[in-house]
Amino acid sequence: MEHPTRVGKYEIEQFLGGGMSHVYKAKDSVLGRRVALKMLTQAGMGDPEAKARFLLEARMASNISHENIIAVYDFGEDQGRPFIVMEYLEGESLRDAIKHQHTGDYTRRMRTALQIARALDHIHGRKIIHRDIKPENINIDLTGKVKLMDFGIAKSEGVQLTRAGFTLGTPFYMAPEQVLGRPVTPQADVYAYGILLFELLTGQKPITGQSIEQIFQSILYEPVNVAPLLAQHIPKDTIELVSFCTAKQVTDRAPNLSYVCDAIENILDPSKPKPSRSGTGAQQIPQSPAPPQAQRPAGTGSQPVGNQPTVQQPTYATQATNAQPSTRTSAQTAVPTSSRIENLPGFLGKLPGPFRSQGGLMLLAGAFVLLLMFSFIGILYALRMI
């Protein structure tokens, strides 16, 4: 196939690959910088939907600016064929990094995962769903900088370009709702991200199969097996995050990529607040005050933990006696001083300690009412028998 030598002001230097569109390494003859030029092929020009998708990618990508997303410099047409000009990336794809074990230790892999999550969170904030999250679409340079690439099948809110009966996306990373042909939401990217995170941490795909049918069966009905994560000694909170992202039901899944970013930041720095699963971003889950507990004897490790405030323990009343604390009866230690009622009139003042309280008096009153009711019923029954 003959490739162009020049497209507008861009001098073509090398063919890098492609399918319905070709990607070239090129040089901007005006600015003198290296760029990647993506051009729709003649076959793509003959497919109205492929052309519409290419133009949609150009419009979407040119309006995105983020440190972890490939930058788009220009787009236009040359001899009727549309093209996109992007930054030329050094480094390798995440697929090659995983294959050649260049992903580094656990901390470096989680930093890579955090950059990917930030990129996806950014495009979701612009109402764009990527729909093709996979290691081939992520570039990592020698410094560990991540760039999300290829918006070829990305979907902007309100735009439908999927052929009837044709499902877009790479099978191993497709969410259950994509497999079922249901409307795709950002949650599909959350699921794909969870699959990619599993692969980044273990070096292997969690979804396997020799045919599309087997792959789809696994996606729909088999939960992600965490055994490979355990074998790699991945921490529990990270394993839980993978499981949360890859839940089969959308409603059971991590609420968004903002939550994922906060979760990974907390994993990398536990001093940061843990994210709420309600999808409210980085807000800390409010802690209910601990219920009061009986005061422990000295020397039993009752000191407060960390920076938690010390809770004032309630004081329990005891009878004036020389007996040791260990000889107290349960009745004597069951009623807090604050609820004891003193100086009761008549026979009430002679009641045992547990009953000289508001709760004890209510219990006695209830028992008395029940006794009257049963007596009345007994009298009525006796009158009927006469």
Image (cartoon, rainbow, N blue to C red):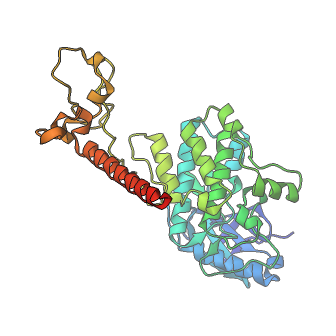
Q: Identify the image quadrant of the N terminus.
A: bottom right
Residue 171 screen position, x and y as percent: 78, 59
In this rendering, the answer to whether 347 lies above or below 258 is above
Residue shown at the point (30%, 16%) measured from the top left: 326
Residue 357 screen position, x and y as percent: 22, 41
- Closer to us: 65 or 279: 279
Residue 108 screen position, x and y as percent: 55, 40
Residue shown at the point (54%, 67%) measured from the top left: 124
- Closer to us: 140 or 217: 217
Residue shown at the point (53%, 74%) measured from the top left: 63
- Closer to us: 145 or 385: 385
- Closer to us: 341 or 79: 341
Please indicate, yes or no, whether residue 91 appears anywhere in the rendered image.
Answer: no
Please indicate, yes or no, whether residue 380 appears anywhere in the rendered image.
Answer: yes
Location of residue 229 (image quadrant): top right
Residue at far right of view: 211
Q: How many numbered circles does the render carry?
A: 0
Location of residue 281 (image quadrant): bottom left
Location of residue 76 (image quadrant): bottom right
Residue 237 screen position, x and y as percent: 54, 41
In this rendering, the answer to whether 258 lies above or below 327 is below
